[in-house]
Each structure stands twice: as structure tokens, then as C-alpha cells.
Amino acid sequence: MRGLTRRAGLALVLIAVAPAAGAGDSDPDYGLAPAKVADGIYVLWGRQEALTQANGANIANAAFVVGSDSVLAVDAGPTRRYGEQMLAAIGAVTDRPVATLVITHHHLDHSFGMAAFAAAGAEIVIHAEALPALDRDSEILLANMNELIGPDWLAGTAIGAPTRLVRAPETVDLGGRAVRILAFAGGHSPGDLAVIDEATATLIAGDLVFMGRAAAVLHADIPTWLDQIDHLAAMGWRRLIPGHGPLVGAPAELDPLRDYLGFVEDFPRRSHGRGDSPLEALMVPLPPRFAALAQIEAEYQRAIFSQFNKFDRLDTATPPPPE
Ligand SMILES: [Zn+2]
């Protein structure tokens, strides 16, 4: 198993996700209900579940910030249908137009609803490093999504083209309300954006922060990610909206995330260094402190395979020529 190929690893990753079940509604409804968490800040809470036909892949949080001129949305959900229903949910809160959609990163549960916002005339902002990943992975992920959640949820879903790429922090004025977009490369994913609303000191962190759910590390560089979490923790926010899980009220609440990421970096590295296979690594019981995390079994299995693949690639990388 030591020589497990990337393709085999990907296959294992895919079967770790729960299969679709039952017949779908031809016009399924996500039942999105914006929850106000601060003045002008609303969250659409995703479920701490796997992607299933029952939940239509509504597993990640999305949010929006209402200014006096316009609305800035953060993430678009997993399907065009989600994006359309999110726009309707925003419209029930405010009549201001959604001028900007910030896609925090390329992962499908955050990004695949973007075409609905493009159709509504919003500017679509994404990290420059996220675009190649979106272009590379979208087609196969759409096909896999079709198997997992079924065609009814996915109707009309196509990956729209982002209209603005970001690599450095910038400020968007929503009309008397300054919202800052922060850019992070190579942590959770190739390119992550976060948003901070200065008026309420609310940080919308995307998948740089997972709460109560095992963090997804398939595209991560964990040491870089941990540095980015330290940076976010020191920003002086009053509340943080994570990509998955409930509201965070203080930086110390990020410690369990740091603990899990540190374990998922260090344990497979040591196991790989001893010559274990991924399956041998998976036979070692997880420390009980991680047992309560949602999706721990599937995410941990994925983490072990992706980390072993990474260490295998590092082992076989050609050393640099002598200077
Ligand atoms: Zn993600």
C-alpha cells in the first residue's frame, strides 16, 4: 500500500462520502433561513453532515453583509439552486442589490452556486490561486455530485467565471460600511479569502476555520494553515463565522482546530517515516478527544491517504542540484 497511487487515493476519498439514497423531489428546497448574528450580518448555517441527496450538499455556511447601498455575499453554496434560493433569502431581508459575491475558495460546497450570482449581475471575487483549481477540478466534481445528490438539486449548475481575482487585501464599500477582503495562499486550499466587517468586528473566515467538524485537509498545507489561523486569531474580532460549524466568540475556541490539524500533520508523518502503510496508520485508534467531531471517520480516512500521498511525493522528489 506504500505505493498507493494518487488515483487510488482519490477513489478512496470519493467512496468515503455517503452515497445518494432515495428518489428526489423534482423541485427541492434548501429551506434557507438567514440568521442575524450582528447588525447587518446574516448567516445561512450549513449542516455538519456528508454530502447526501437529503441535504443537497448544503453542508457549508454562507453569509452576507448588508450596507446602505449594496450587499456583499460570502460563498454561494453547492448548486445553482442554492445560489438562487440564497439570493431570494437575501431579498427577503433587504432590497439592496447583491453587488459582490466573495467565493472563499474553490471547494464545491462554497463555490458551485456562483452562476446564480453571476446571472443576477454580481461581481464574483475569488483568490487568484483558487481559479486554476476550480478550472481543473470542477468537471469531475460536478459528475461526482450528480451521483451523490442527484440531478434535481444540480439542475442548471455550471461553474461560472469569477470576474475579479484577488491576491492582496482590499476594501469594498457597501455604502457607509467598509468590508475588508483578506487573501491567504496555500493553507486550507490553494487560495482562501476571508472577509472582515469593520463596523461589527465580525470575521467571516471560510474554511480557514472549522468548528465541531473534522477539518478537510485534502488540498491543505497544514503548517501554512496553522500560521494563517494564528494570524486570524490575532485580528481582534468580536465574533467569527467559520466555514463549517457554529459561531466563534473568542480566539481560544480555535484551539481544538489547531490540535486536530497538528495531529493530522504529525501522526501520519511519523507513521509514514516508520514505513507504515496508510491502512496500518488507520488501524491506530484516534485519540478520544477527536471522537465528537462531525464527519471524523470520513475526513480522518481522507486525511491519512492524502497526507501519505503528499509524503510519498516528497520522498520521490528530485533533490535540487548542488550550488
Ligand atoms: Zn474547503
Image: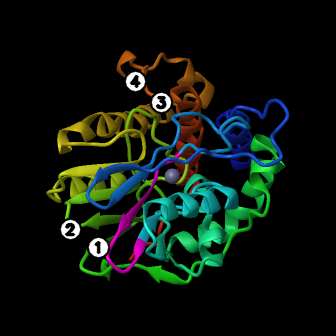
Q: Marks 3 and 1: in contact by CB < 8 Å?
A: no
Regarding mark 4 in the picture, which secondary structure is present there?
helix
175, 131: nearer the viewer: 175
- Residue found at x 40% / y 40%: 265
- Residue found at x 45% / y 50%: 34
Image quarter of the N terminus: top right
Q: Is residue 106 visible?
A: no
Q: If you read the primary sequence from the N terminus, does the residue marked by circle 2 or circle 1 appear first?
A: 1
Regarding mark 3 in the picture, which secondary structure is present there?
helix
Q: Amino acid at mark 2?
A: Glu
Q: Is mark 3 within 8 Å of ligand 1?
A: no
Counting labels gives 4
Label 1, label 4: how far apart the Cα atoms are: 33 Å
Q: Measured from the top left, where is residue 92 in percent x and y? A: 49, 60
Label 4, label 2: how far apart the Cα atoms are: 34 Å
Magenta residues (range): 60-71
